[in-house]
Image (cartoon, rainbow, N blue to C red):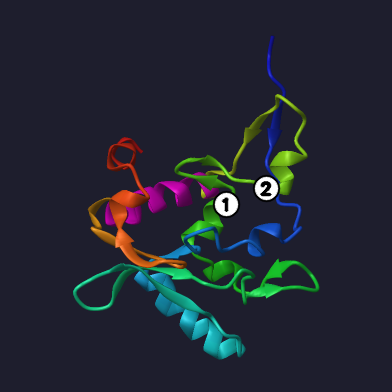
Amino acid sequence: MKRLRVKWRCLHCGECCRNLVGRHFGMILTPDEWRRLNRLARWLGVKLETKPLVAGPIGARLYQVTQEVCPFLDRKRNKCRIYQARPLVCRMFPLSPYGILSCTAVERAPKGALIEFPDEMKLALNQFMIRVLPVLREADFIYDLTWGWRPTSRYFNRIALRLI
């Protein structure tokens, strides 16, 4: 029996932009994304709050957003004000290296349906795995938003990171 196939389509509910911080970490940004988003925040007159995630010899190797709601979300229209310049994490949502994240569009898909995600989304996930996962894999310490700097081994199984 063939499974029903449905194309994933954003519903513009804005939920993905309202849950940027988990129990220990915020949404991940590369240094290039961090610089770009800080320039855009100044230009738009919004405040982007971040902390390092992985330290480097000069500055951070990865950053994390510490705000629960994205400052670039137009809350009236549930639209991204920097859509063309959004970071990899936003481009790949709801895909992640660990599976499919909670997403209203996915939750509303018919039960048992095979969801087809756009190529742009899959490409962003691939770029994330190439640019971000190796930095996490090599890190000895990461910054936990609750506890501060902690050994990476406390959070990630390095074997699992190698398999991804």
Identify the image quadrant of the N terminus: top right
Which residue of the protein is positioned furthest toward the front in this rendering? Answer: 147
Report the residue at 68% width, 42% height from top: 8
Magenta region, main secondary structure: helix
* Image-based side of 39 in relation to 100, left or right: left
Mark 1, other Cα within 10 Å: few <14 / some 14–19 / many ≥20: some
Mark 2, other Cα within 10 Å: few <14 / some 14–19 / many ≥20: some
113 above or below 58? above
Report the residue at 46% width, 48% height from top: 125
Tell me the CA gap for discs 2 and 1. Answer: 8 Å
118 above or below 148? above
- Residue occupied by mark 2: 103
2 above or below 15? above
Q: Is residue 135 magenta?
A: yes
Callouts 2 and 1 close, C-beta under 8 Å = yes
Q: Is residue 151 magenta?
A: no
> Residue 90, image x and y in percent?
55, 59
72 above or below 102? below
Determine the image quadrant of residue 114. top right
Between 102 and 3, the one nearer to me in the picture:
102
Task: Give the magenta range.
Answer: 121-136
Identify the image quadrant of the C terminus: top left
Could you tell me the amino acid type at mark 2?
Cys
- Residue occupied by mark 1: 93
Could you tell me the amino acid type at mark 1?
Phe
Determine the image quadrant of residue 57. bottom left
> Residue 11, image x and y in percent?
76, 52
Report the residue at 46% width, 76% height from top: 50
